[in-house]
Image: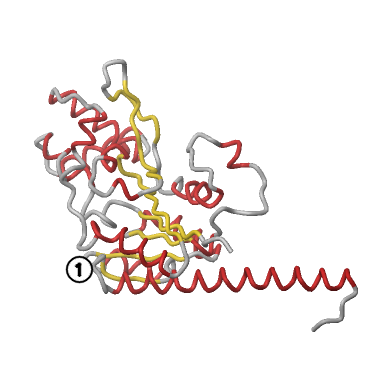
Amino acid sequence: MAKPIIALMYDFDSTLSTTDMQEYDFIKNLEMTPKEFWQEAALYTKKYGVERILAYMYVMVKKCREKGIRLTEKYLNDCGKNIVFFKGVTTWFDRINEYANSIGAQVEHYIISSGTSEIVMGSEIAKYFKKIYGCKFLYDDNGEAIWPSMAINYTLKTQYIFRIGKGVLDEFDDDNLNKHSESRRIPYENMIYLGDGLTDIPCMKLLREKGGKSIALYPSGNKKRAKQLVEDKRINYVTVADYSPNSTLEKIIKMMIDNMVSYANLKDREEKQIAAFKKMTLEGTNED
């Protein structure tokens, strides 16, 4: 049988990176504190009713204009170069891929984030993802950002789980996404979502209901956000955000991959035996 495909889907901010991606270089370059930046974004939501993701993207454009910073795709890419990741992240993907291959599986990694896609694309781990879903900007003829071209809020994240499952990865291909299909490229039971907080609840809830797995991560010494996810029964597992070899997270992921491969093998054998039985019945064979 073909290798089962397993999708590992990650939030980015405070899941892979130690804090929000804008806080490493982008906000610092504006000579603002993270608190000042996020408070200004929240003001547009509160005062004008601007959706929260659109509000922070507007403030990114507005503040860069005020500071005379050319908000280009390259500039945003550069703002991803100094992102700090949790322990073990930079070697995580190769290790997990190697383990999956050793037991007859294929792992694909995806980002589903409400953060800025261009910043993620500039990070050192961008090369490991089959697809990065995040907020994006529209650029004018001079290459400067003028408007959001894609905004992904917390509930919209779930559509990308559907896309990944059906293999319709182009975020603008709605026709094929909405076509009825009996089969999925990656079944829900072969999906794992990793997130850190309440904003990940829609994805976590969807996977739990559909037979996939969800893992809540928290920084060492700070279990507050994960505690709520546990109490609300949104997740399958919870552990510290440590991606190091032999960490609890690595052991959990490997056990999940083991189970998914076993289930895929059992399902394949079941289908073959049923097909063989039907064939014998049609041929009138009495073999046991």
| Rendered location of residue 188, percent (x, y) | 54, 60
Instruction: Judge whether 153 appears above or below 74 on screen.
Output: below
Q: Is residue 74 above or below residue 15?
A: above
Q: Quadrant of residue 99?
A: bottom left
Residue 171 point in image, percent of width and height: 48, 38
- Which amino acid, mark 1? Ser
Residue 114, picture quadrant: top left
Q: Position of residue 118 (x, y in %)?
A: 29, 37
Residue, far right: 284
Residue ranking furthest to the top: 141
In-front residue for pair 225/248: 248
Relative to 154, say whether 269 is above or below: below
Q: Nearest the camera: 71 or 153?
A: 71
Where is the C terminus found, in terms of image quarters? bottom right
160 relative to 112 in the view: left or right: right
Q: Position of residue 257 (x, y in %)?
A: 44, 69
The residue at the point 29 percent across, 74 percent down is: 248
Residue pushed farthest bottom?
288
Q: Nearer the viewer, residue 62 or 240?
A: 240
**Residue under numbered circle 1:** 220
